[in-house]
Amino acid sequence: MKKRYFGLVLYLVFAILPIYWMLNMSLKTNEEITGVFSLWPHQLTFANFRTILTDPAWYGGYINSLIYVGINTVLSVAVALPAAYAFSRYQFLGDKHLFFWLLTNRMSPPAVFLLPFFQLYSSVGLFDTHIAVAMAHMLFNVPLAVWILEGFMSGIPREIDETAYIDGYSFPRFFLRIFIPLIGAGIGVTAFFCFMFSWVELLLARTLTSVNAKPIVAIMTRTVSAAGMDWGVLAAAGVLTIVPGALVIWFVRNYIAKGFAMGRV
């Protein structure tokens, strides 16, 4: 029993230590970070957070990231819902092959699609816009969303569909008022993973933007200059980057547990 608790405590320390150390660095000056090894700040300062929250270039990056991640999450779930229902309820020629082909898009590295997206968006005037990054991330998030939602939908008995049709429900009314509430947990899990993968993606978000929609992950490179690395501001930016993901996890934590229980996560 003691060995089991010791292993759990060791794992928690190993998992939390990088986050604590980043928070520790964000509350120090650069001189203290580079000069003295300490487990806590000896000269506590909030100047690094003040720099991010008062500089439009910094907090604008967070706003840009939240905008395109939100657009991507909504569009990915909206597109995946009817697609997943079709895979769950109907059988058609090549359905299994098409389902596997969707997943192969998730397996491909983003660098493969970088040049085609860049040329396409530059040609149609979508370069450096939030919708451009959101649509590019849909290439990877929609297959994942379809795969997760199909598992939840397959767990809903087909008799519910048939009973609704007998009661006179049209398909849109049945889908919106009956079916979607039944898979609320699946939608929550799907939205979480779409948010997470879009939030942490760097290559496409950095290449497809320049000024107006530049994400926080690209702005964090500003800490590198001829004078050296601004470790304090970089650590503060990292701490603030964790906050949106932590909030999303908090709101969908019960749905994630159901997703693990159903074996689709």
Image (tube, helix red, strand yellow):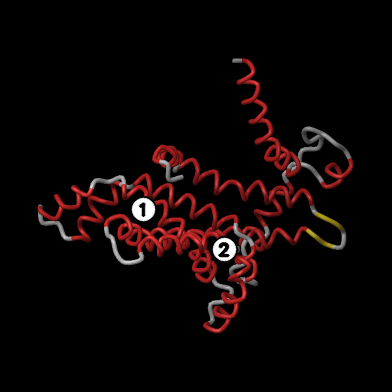
Q: Is residue 238 left or right of residue 175?
A: right
Q: Quadrant of residue 18?
A: top right
Outermost residue to the top:
1
Labels 2 and 1 touching (C-beta < 8 A): no
Give the residue number, with chain letter if any, for mark 1: 150
Residue beneath the point at 43% across and 45% down: 264
Image coords of residue 83 (percent x, y) = 35, 62
Give the residue number, with chain letter if any, for mark 2: 108
Q: Residues within 10 Å of mark 1 (few under 14, many from 20)?
A: many
Image coords of residue 136 (percent x, y) = 53, 68
Q: In this view, does 15 lie above or below 78?
A: above
Q: Which of marks 2 and 1 is nearer the N terminus?
A: 2
Image coords of residue 9 (percent x, y) = 64, 25
Kind of residue at badge 2:
Ser
Q: Is residue 70 left or right of residue 23?
A: left
Kind of residue at badge 1:
Glu
Q: How crowded is mark 2: few (under 14 residues within 10 Å), some or many (20 or more)?
A: few
Q: In which quarter of the image is the N terminus?
A: top right
Q: What element carries label 1?
A: helix
Q: In which quarter of the image is residue 207?
A: bottom right
| Residue 237, visible in the rendered structure | yes
Residue beneath the point at 78% across and 42% down: 28
Q: Is residue 69 left or right of residue 44?
A: left
